[in-house]
Image (cartoon, rainbow, N blue to C red):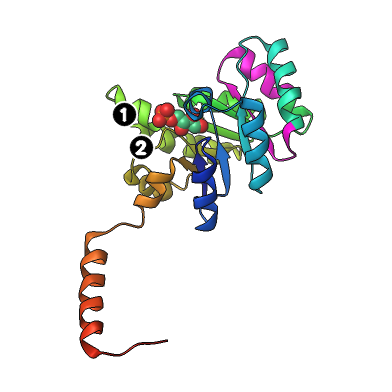
C-alpha cells in the first residue's frame, strides 16, 4: 500500500519522506490557498523533492481550458499527475490526457458509478473522498469497498487513491479493503505510530534501564 501526503507544506513532505512515508503528494486548490504559496512555484518545488507522483489540480471547468492548464502544469516536473474533477468535462480531459500517456488523478469522486467512469476514461488514479462522505452521514468506506469490487470485476488498472482521510481508522479500513493508496495529512500518518501501551512500555523500560547504571555507548 502506498502512502501519499495530502499537503502543500514543504516541511510536512520532507518529514514524511525522511520516515519513508511519502510515495507521492496530492494537493488541491484549498491546500494551495492554505499554504499561501504561488501555485506553480510550490508544485515545482514539491515535484523536485519527491520521486513519486505529485497531483496538481486544474481549476477550469471546461475541457479546452483544462487542457491548456494541464499543459502548463506538466512543464513543472516529469512526475506531475493532473488532477481533474469528476465532471463530464473532466472525464473528457482525462481521456485526452491519458491517451497522451499523462497520469490523471480524477478527484471529487463520491460514488462507485463515478469511479467506473473514471476508469473507463483511463484515469491512473481515482480519488474517492471518504471523510466528506462520513460528514454527511454515509460510511465512506463502503464506497471504497464497492470501487474495489468493480475494478477487480473488470480488471481496471486505475489505482484507488483513498482521499479525504481524517483519522487512522480510515487507513486501517483502506488497507483491509486493499485500496492501492491512501493520501492523508502528515498528522494522520504520524498518528499511525501512536499507541498508549507503546508509550507506557517505553517509559518502564527507560526507568529500569536507568536503574542498571549501564550505558550502551
Ligand atoms: C486529496 O486529493 C483531496 O483533495 C483531499 O484529501 C480532500 O480532503 P478534505 O476532505 O479533508 O479536504
Mark 2 Cβ and ligand 1 under 8 Å apart: yes
Of pointers 2 and 1, the one earlier in the residue sequence = 1
Residue 187: image x %, image y %? 38, 45
- When the figure is inspected, residue 142 is found, relative to residue 121, above or below; the finding is below
**Residue 152's quadrant in the figure?**
top right
Judge the density around disc 1: few (<14), some (14-19), many (≥20) Cα neighbours within 10 Å: some
Q: Quadrant of the C terminus?
A: bottom left
Q: Judge by depth and name the residue closer to the eye, 41 or 201.
A: 41
Distance from the alpha carbon under mark 2 to that under mark 1: 10 Å
Answer whether residue 74 is magenta in the image: no
Q: Which residue is drawn at 30% across and 90% down?
A: 214
Secondary structure of residue under mark 2: loop
Q: Give the range drawn in magenta.
A: 76-96
Q: Judge by depth and name the residue closer to the eye, 21 or 116.
A: 21
Residues at marks 2 and 1 touching, judged by CB atoms closer than 8 Å: yes
- When the figure is inspected, residue 64 is found, relative to residue 208, above or below; the finding is above
What residue sits right under mark 2 in the picture?
166
Ligand 1's quadrant: top left
Residue 96: image x %, image y %? 74, 22
Answer whether residue 91 is magenta in the image: yes
Residue 162: image x %, image y %? 47, 37
- When the figure is inspected, residue 5 is found, relative to residue 121, above or below; the finding is below
Residue found at the very far right of the displayed protein: 100
Residue 61: image x %, image y %? 61, 11
Judge the density around disc 2: few (<14), some (14-19), many (≥20) Cα neighbours within 10 Å: some
Q: Which residue is drawn at 59% across and 37% down?
A: 154
What residue sits right under mark 1 in the picture?
134
Is residue 114 left or right of 121 when viewed as pictured?
left
Number of numbered discs visible in the structure rendering: 2
Residue 58, visible in the rendered structure = yes
Amino acid at each position: 500500500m502506498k502512502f501519499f501526503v495530502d499537503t502543500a507544506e514543504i516541511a510536512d513532505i520532507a518529514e514524511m519522506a525522511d520516515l519513508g512515508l511519502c510515495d507521492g503528494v496530492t494537493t488541491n486548490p484549498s491546500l494551495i490557498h492554505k499554504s499561501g504559496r504561488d501555485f506553480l512555484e510550490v508544485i515545482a518545488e514539491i515535484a523536485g523533492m519527491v520521486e513519486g507522483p505529485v497531483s496538481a489540480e486544474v481549476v477550469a471547468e471546461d475541457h479546452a481550458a483544462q487542457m491548456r492548464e494541464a499543459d502548463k502544469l506538466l512543464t513543472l516536473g516529469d512526475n506531475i499527475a493532473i488532477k481533474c474533477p469528476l465532471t463530464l468535462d473532466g472525464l473528457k480531459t482525462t481521456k485526452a490526457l491519458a491517451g497522451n500517456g499523462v497520469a490523471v488523478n480524477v478527484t471529487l469522486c463520491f460514488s462507485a458509478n463515478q469511479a467506473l467512469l473514471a476508469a473507463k476514461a483511463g484515469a491512473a488514479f481515482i480519488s474517492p473522498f471518504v471523510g466528506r462522505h462520513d460528514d454527511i452521514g454515509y460510511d465512506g468506506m463502503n464506497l471504497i469497498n464497492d470501487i474495489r469490487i468493480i475494478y477487480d470485476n473488470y480488471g481496471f488498472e486505475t489505482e484507488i487513491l483513498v482521499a479525504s482521510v481524517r483519522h487512522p481508522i480510515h487507513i486501517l479500513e483502506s488497507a483491509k479493503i486493499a485500496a492501492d493508496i491512501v493520501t492523508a495529512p502528515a498528522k494522520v500518518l504520524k498518528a499511525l505510530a501512536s499507541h498508549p501501551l507503546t508509550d507506557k512500555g517505553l517509559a518502564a523500560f527507560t526507568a529500569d534501564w536507568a536503574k542498571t547504571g549501564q550505558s550502551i555507548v
